Image (spheres, coloured by chain):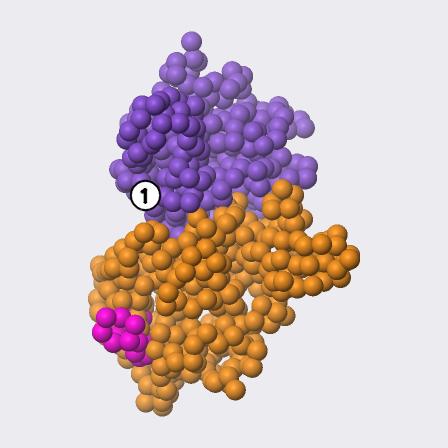
Chain colours: A purple, B orange
């Protein structure tokens, strides 16, 4: 039985801490991912928080320190709703593992991402009430889940730049897809930072700290950074991950599938990340020599992925189908995972690939 | 003699309209490009505007129509200075031409870009004075240079989204590198839109129009759009280009150079475009199998490129040196120009490549 009310078709990489992703075919079914199938990526045990005693503190470089119960938050500030895709920075790591091993990291497929309707209050409104100092350039989120991955056990935390924190799309959310935020997704309250890697959407939020520097905990100073191939994780080493990089993958058919000759429907996702939008998606069966343009499906706004669909007429035999997306800056994706390999296995945004056997 | 006070080492692709780029080696010399060597990309004859009678009009969806002489602009609004890289969307087109011909388009190398210190007033301040209507979602710039490239002759114009126009980095500039803006660069006044393709930094600016739709002239509705390989230019077809896509290239040594065995210094540029920063630059001599990290040179702020330098120890023989950059979203560049080929030859942001012969 899959724990935490998750569906039996989840791919569970680890039971404790709980790490599970959505199956490709399930992602392909709907632009909004069902909560029971939504990925869950954790660095410690899921904390059980009693919402009746829980409070959110706001402190650090502020004119006024604040503290709220859930009711107080919803009474004091306007409720907001955002449809946003969250994507783990390690999504599609499996493609990098085919290049070279990455010990100790889960072999995520493309399902360490999902799209939900999040409801709560705008972080910007809460910050305004706290009157941040000019020097407060970063907004940190402290959770209460404790991880033993750092050199000594540490509660999870992360920060985002204040200029992002003050944008209207960044929420403190207590609702996911119309229901109370489940414990496995950070209930009673989590940050939702659209366009940023999932690791910044801190769960089981207990404290917001206004700071002059980014969060200095393990999961920002050492983890979630893109290292050069030969580098070792160390505080400050590598590119700190923030905005998600443009990505796409094929969700159906499955890799290695046997399909009938004739017209094949191929479906997948594309996600531009950051401030960008998905502008076009192309599919190829000749390693990018020629392309078929995919149809972009439901547009759920600027913070959500786009599912897409294409039709290919395939001859009998073996084919490799590849996909790439273009974003609103007319940037597209790197071709191969090899040149993207990095020691922690983040940001595999190489072309999506599946091999199919077309029956004669 | 190169016209318009340009240096003799400019690469002139066309004399009328004047289209000339900076030589690679000259770009490599300084993070701020000398004005006499700065690229000039034009669609019509350079207009000669008398600054003493010239005026800028602001109209369209505004509460107050405005008109300014140069003196009135500088008296009414605070002066601002921004160091910004401008890059033509066709820069590096030569790499796409090696894949397949692109009739009627200049074979730009990487020198259709340059970095200057621009001085003038913030567009945001001027817009505020005009009190734009809520429906004014776009800010259009109309120049007075007339082009015969459209189906019928047309003055150059382009627009940017209002959310960009209201950012402090967007200038109406009358000064370039400390001197009055030369006619060949749009004097007396031009728009400077940092992070966007050069085509939006409209020269010989005469009118700013607040609109509910993007500019509908030829150079935005039909040109400066990334088409699918099999598509024909047509109004509304393709991805409208705005934010510049991450790019980099090698500036020295020259392609085909003969160099001595031993340690070779390689220099080049990287430009993240849009809101992004250059985070890392890598150089490889084995087609991306292994990489050497380049040293990033002078940081001129968030709107400027980064020059970089790397040292390679090369065995005698032939080598292909490649470069790629990473941006602040940990996105990197596509590998080959082939899959990027498009009918107008825009946005070649494939890895930069030069071949060298190392003498034995």
- Placement of the N terminus of chain A among the 4 image quadrants: top left
Q: Percent x, y for residue B331?
A: 50, 46
Q: Nearer the viewer, residue A128 or A3?
A: A3
Q: Chain of mark 1?
A: A
Judge whether A322 appears above or below B92 on screen.
Answer: above
Q: Nearer the viewer, residue A346 or B303?
A: A346
- Placement of the C terminus of chain A among the 4 image quadrants: top left
Judge whether B278 appears above or below B192 on screen.
Answer: above
Q: Nearer the viewer, residue A253 or B240?
A: A253
Q: Nearer the viewer, residue A136 or A291?
A: A291
Q: Percent x, y for residue B78?
A: 43, 74
Identify the residue position indicated by label 1 in the image.
A293
Q: Residue at x 28, y 76 (%)?
A: B148
Number of numbered callouts drawn: 1
Q: Residue at x 51, y 15 (%)?
A: A15
Q: Which residues are magenta?
A: B137-155
Please tell me whether the stretch drawn in magenta is mainly helix, strand or loop.
Answer: strand
Q: Residue at x 44, y 13 (%)?
A: A3
Q: Percent x, y for residue A216?
A: 61, 39
């Amino acid at each position: 039985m899959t724990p935490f009310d998750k569906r039996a078709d989840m791919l569970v990489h680890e039971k404790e801490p709980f790490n599970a992703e959505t199956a490709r075919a399930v992602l392909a079914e709907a632009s909004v991912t069902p909560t029971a199938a939504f990925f869950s990526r954790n660095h410690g045990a899921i904390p059980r928080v009693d919402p009746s005693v829980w409070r959110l503190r706001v402190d650090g470089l502020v004119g006024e320190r604040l503290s709220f119960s859930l009711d107080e938050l919803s009474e004091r500030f306007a409720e907001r709703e955002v449809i946003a895709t969250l994507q783990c920075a390690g999504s599609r790591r499996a493609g990098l593992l085919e290049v070279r091993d990455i010990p100790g990291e889960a072999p995520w497929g493309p399902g360490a991402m999902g799209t939900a309707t999040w409801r709560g209050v705008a972080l910007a409104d809460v910050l305004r009430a706290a009157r941040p100092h000019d020097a407060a350039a970063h907004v940190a989120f402290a959770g209460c889940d404790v991880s033993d991955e750092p050199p000594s056990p540490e509660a999870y935390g992360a920060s985002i730049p204040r200029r992002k924190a003050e944008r209207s799309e960044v929420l403190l959310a207590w609702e996911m897809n119309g229901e109370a935020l489940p414990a496995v997704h950070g209930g009673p309250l989590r940050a939702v930072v659209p366009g940023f890697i999932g690791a910044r959407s801190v769960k089981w939020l207990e404290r917001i700290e206004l700071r002059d520097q980014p969060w200095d905990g393990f999961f920002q100073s050492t983890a979630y950074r893109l290292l050069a191939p030969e580098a070792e994780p160390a505080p400050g080493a590598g590119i700190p991950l923030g905005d998600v990089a443009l990505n796409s993958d094929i969700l159906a058919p499955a890799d290695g599938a046997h399909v009938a000759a004739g017209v094949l429907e191929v479906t997948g996702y594309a996600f531009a990340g950051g401030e960008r939008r998905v502008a076009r998606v192309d599919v190829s069966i000749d390693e990018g020599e020629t392309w078929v343009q995919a149809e972009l499906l439901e547009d759920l706004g600027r913070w959500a992925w786009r599912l897409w669909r294409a039709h290919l007429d395939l001859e009998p035999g073996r084919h490799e189908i590849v996909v790439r997306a273009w974003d609103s800056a007319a940037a597209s994706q790197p071709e191969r995972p090899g040149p993207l390999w990095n020691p922690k296995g983040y940001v595999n945004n190489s072309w999506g690939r599946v091999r199919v056997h077309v029956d004669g």
